[in-house]
Image (tube, rainbow, N blue to C red):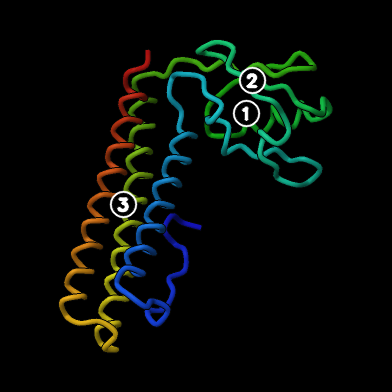
Amino acid sequence: MKPGNQPTPSASVYKTVKDVEAHAKSRMEKVLSDLQHEMAGIRTGRASIGLFDPIRVDYYGTPTPLNQLATLHVPEPSLVTIQPWDVSQIGAIEKAIRSSDLGLNPTNDGKIIRVPIPPLTEERRKEIVKHLHAVAEEHRVAVRNIRRDANEALKKMLKDKLISEDDERRGLDEVQKLTDTYIAKVDQATKAKEKEILELK
């Protein structure tokens, strides 16, 4: 499910303007945590366990998150070790890492997988930043869609005479403030991640 695509209750579910605001806020919060989760999987030059979050391993025909099949460690800044709980899965885990778009080259000694995290080239950094901006924009759009849904709910409540025009105006202002706050949080998180990608040598 795309960020922010939780179903919107129909306006009649809302009793007050505060209900609309609270629902919009909780949906925007989900968009932000989805963004943070997605950013954890975006590679920087530093080894991190979060990098492997998106990886699914074919475990007896079921795509299974890597962290449910192995223990991951970062023994040094440019190395991740992966210790499968079931050693027979070592080949499947290695294959999943190789075929991911992380561009990593794992090796194994039959018991443990070592994944060196090579420093990023200037060109690769720029590609990653471009991808990061696309991800951030997707989440900004999700926040704006939530604003639209909330505004439509307020307009319907006014039309159904559940709230006054003043209430509607106040509600629209509050929803706009929420939108500005969450767009700023998306921008802030994106800037911090971009700095991390570009700075690390």
Q: Nearer the viewer, residue 146 or 135?
A: 146
In the image, taking residue 78 as reference, residue 18 lies left or right, namely left
Percent position of residue 117, x then y: 52, 17
Q: At 25% across and 45% down in the image, what residue appears?
A: 184
Q: CA distance from mark 1 to mark 2?
A: 7 Å
Q: Which residue is mark 3?
A: 140
Q: How many marks?
A: 3
Does label 2 or label 3 sit earlier along the sequence? 2
Q: Which residue is mark 2?
A: 106
Do the residues bearing badges 3 and 1 touch, measured as CB atoms within 8 Å?
no
Do the residues bearing badges 1 and 2 touch, measured as CB atoms within 8 Å?
yes
Percent position of residue 54, x then y: 57, 39
Image vertical order of residue 19 relative to residue 161, above or below: above
Quadrant location of the C terminus in the rendered image: top left
Specify the amino acid type for callout 2. Pro
Specify the amino acid type for callout 3. Arg
Numbered disc in front, either 2 or 3: 3
- For the residue carrying disc 3, how many other residues have a C-alpha within 10 Å: few (<14), some (14-19), or many (20+)? many
Percent position of residue 61, x then y: 78, 46
Q: Which residue is mark 1?
A: 98
In the image, taking residue 33 as reference, residue 88 lies left or right, namely right
